[in-house]
Image: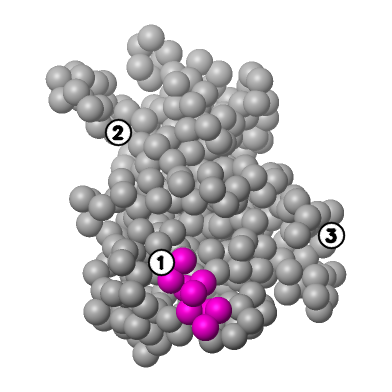
């Protein structure tokens, strides 16, 4: 399979709720290759999962276009559509809902192998399933292959879901908060499994999370997009954004991340927002959507105009009119 280049151009996703329009995704453009990693962070309801499903081809955008290797998704047919479906896989957030409860681990993992003719026969399929279980650290694999989801823990179920995504040798994986519903004690273990898979299989990732610490742990060498009310408000290299945040929302998120040293955490400055209420997607404020909460908003500017995502340094983009937000908010 050739290198995969994914392009999103002016993507919007709106839903109608009675007489109102709910703007879940509002004008997002991205371009990345299958060997890259992009972490998306933001509060619940910011549109991260919806964007992930659009990239995976599970839902269609209301406006805008998606291109794979320069070809419009809407124009792909037959074999090309099948190849894209195979190239981009998704790991869903909820391991309790994403696995069919009446199908064993073997049935779940062997079905795509047989459908895509990646296994010659039942024996070959079983051999491949056992290999996949070892890849995701479900060992010994013979203890898991014929179990059903209700016989597995939450972490084990999520590992099966990861193995399912790997069955068809994908080029790119959309991981939607893959550790948010597992025990804290095994989060790091699953993250390490995903990092190893990324290295060994040379697969790209869209890693969706609300936790900036997890984003840095998994994708510190990749790119980071910060989402707020359906828009990307800051975008660039992960380490650069975390070390030098420029949007007030990103600065606020980082101020809430605990430090390893409890003394440092206690002395860390907390950002006081003007409001704790997140705007409703069916009633977004005029101007910058963050301005009702922003402590450094400029009256007559931020509440009237919607800032565009523009370059502010090398490979660093921010949608904000206040260029010295960090200094004002943290007193640096």
Gap in angstroms between the C-alphas marked 1 and 2: 34 Å
Q: Which residues are magenta?
A: 123-131
Gap in angstroms between the C-alphas marked 1 and 3: 35 Å
Choose the circle earlier in sequence order: 1 or 3. Answer: 3
Q: Left or right: 29 with respect to 103?
A: right
Decide if residue 197 is in sight here.
yes
* In the foreground, 118 or 19: 118
Q: Residues within 10 Å of mark 3 (few under 14, many from 20)?
A: some
Choose the circle earlier in sequence order: 1 or 2. Answer: 1
Q: Residues within 10 Å of mark 2 (few under 14, many from 20)?
A: few
Of the numbered discs in the image, which one, if any, rests on residue 133? 1
Of the numbered discs in the image, which one, if any, rests on residue 71? 3
Choose the circle earlier in sequence order: 3 or 2. Answer: 3
What element does badge 1 sit on? helix
* In the foreground, 233 or 179: 179
- Residue 301 drawn at (x, y percent): 58, 28
Name the chief secondary structure element in magenta: helix
Q: Residue furthest bottom?
A: 102
What element does badge 2 sit on? loop
Q: Quadrant of residue 14?
A: bottom right
Disc 2 marks which residue? Answer: 257
């Amino acid at each position: 399979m050739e290198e995969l280049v994914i392009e999103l151009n002016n993507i919007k996703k709106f839903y109608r709720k009675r007489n109102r329009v709910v703007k879940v995704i509002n004008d997002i453009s991205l371009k990345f290759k299958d060997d890259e990693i992009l972490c998306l962070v933001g509060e619940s309801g910011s549109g991260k999962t919806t964007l992930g499903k659009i990239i995976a081809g599970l839902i269609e955008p209301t406006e805008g276009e998606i291109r794979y290797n320069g070809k419009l998704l809407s124009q792909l047919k037959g074999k090309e559509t099948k190849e894209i479906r195979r190239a981009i896989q998704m790991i869903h957030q909820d391991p309790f809902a994403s696995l069919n409860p009446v199908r064993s681990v073997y049935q779940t993992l062997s079905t795509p192998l047989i459908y895509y003719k990646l296994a010659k026969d039942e024996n070959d399929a079983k051999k491949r399933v056992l290999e996949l279980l070892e890849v995701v650290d479900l060992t010994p694999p013979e203890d898991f292959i014929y179990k059903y989801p209700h016989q597995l823990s939450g972490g084990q179920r999520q590992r099966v879901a990861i193995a399912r995504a790997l069955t068809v040798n994908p080029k790119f994986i959309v991981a939607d908060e893959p550790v948010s519903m597992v025990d804290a004690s095994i989060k790091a273990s699953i993250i390490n499994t995903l990092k190893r898979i990324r290295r060994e299989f040379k697969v790209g990732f869209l890693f969706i999370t609300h936790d900036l610490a997890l984003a840095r742990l998994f994708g510190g060498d990749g790119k980071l997009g910060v989402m707020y009310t359906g828009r990307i408000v800051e975008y660039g290299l992960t380490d650069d954004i975390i070390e030098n945040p420029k949007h007030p929302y990103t600065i606020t998120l980082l101020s809430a991340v605990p430090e390893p040293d409890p003394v440092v955490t206690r002395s860390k400055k907390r950002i006081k927002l003007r409001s704790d209420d997140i705007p409703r997607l069916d009633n977004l404020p005029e101007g910058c959507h963050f301005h009702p909460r922003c402590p450094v908003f400029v009256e007559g500017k931020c509440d009237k105009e919607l800032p565009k995502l523009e370059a502010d340094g090398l490979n660093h983009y921010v949608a904000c009119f206040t260029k010295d937000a960090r200094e004002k908010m943290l007193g640096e």
